[in-house]
Amino acid sequence: MASILLTVNGQQKRVEAPPDEPLLWVLRNRLEMTGTKYGCGEGQCGACTVLLDGEAQPSCQKAVSEAASKRIVTIEGLAQNGRLHPVQAAFLAEEAFQCGYCTSGMIVASVGLLKTNPNPSAEDVAGALVRNVCRCGTHPRILAAILSLNHKGAEK
């Protein structure tokens, strides 16, 4: 075990964990932030996506010690001052979810995309979300939600 200082959603959190423990398990089990989901455990489904220094990354494949020097943002950290992040609001407006299991990873990955490309094409969105799986097949609504944000300052 090691004492590891993390910056999660703008707050510093100290955890006792093995340095090689996946960030996903630290977030869920030690910090009780359960919005980040476990899917495949291999970084292939996107359910565990978080932002590390603004870049979408699978938290199941990142050791907590690797994340210690980075700013970590989870789905819980996107809303600010009681207001949903524009991507969250767009997902609601377009009903871009069904069972909801993939939703947090899809939203976080979309926020990461919009930070670097605030006006993505449909191809850009598809490329950015290629590692995010939705088994319910709501991809058309997810695409519509993200594209609805073009020119609306969603790069927040």
Image (cartoon, grey):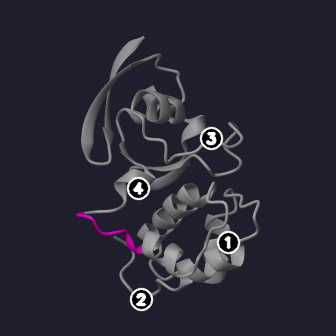
Mark nearer the N terminus (1 vs 2): 1
State the residue position of label 1. Answer: 126
Q: Is residue 5 left or right of residue 18?
A: left
The kind of residue on which mark 4 rests is Gly
Mark nearer the N terminus (1 vs 4): 4
Q: Please tell me how crowded label 4 is: few (under 14), some (14-19), or many (20+) other residues with Cα within 10 Å.
A: some
Mark nearer the N terminus (4 vs 2): 4
User: Could you tell me which residue is drawn at 70 percent across and 72 percent down?
Assistant: 139
Q: Is residue 26 left or right of residue 105?
A: left
Q: Please tell me how crowded label 2 is: few (under 14), some (14-19), or many (20+) other residues with Cα within 10 Å.
A: few
Disc 3 versus disc 4: nearer the observer: 3
Disc 3 vs disc 2: Cβ atoms closer than 8 Å?
Answer: no
User: Could you tell me which residue is drawn at 76 percent across and 60 percent down?
Assistant: 135
* Residue 54, disc: 4
Mark nearer the N terminus (3 vs 4): 3
- Label 1 to label 4, Cα distance in Å? 19 Å
The kind of residue on which mark 2 rests is His
- Label 1 to label 3, Cα distance in Å? 22 Å
User: Could you tell me which residue is drawn at 48 percent across and 42 percent down?
Assistant: 34
The kind of residue on which mark 1 rests is Ala
Q: Nearer the viewer, residue 117 or 27?
A: 27
Disc 4 vs disc 2: Cβ atoms closer than 8 Å?
Answer: no
Mark nearer the N terminus (1 vs 3): 3
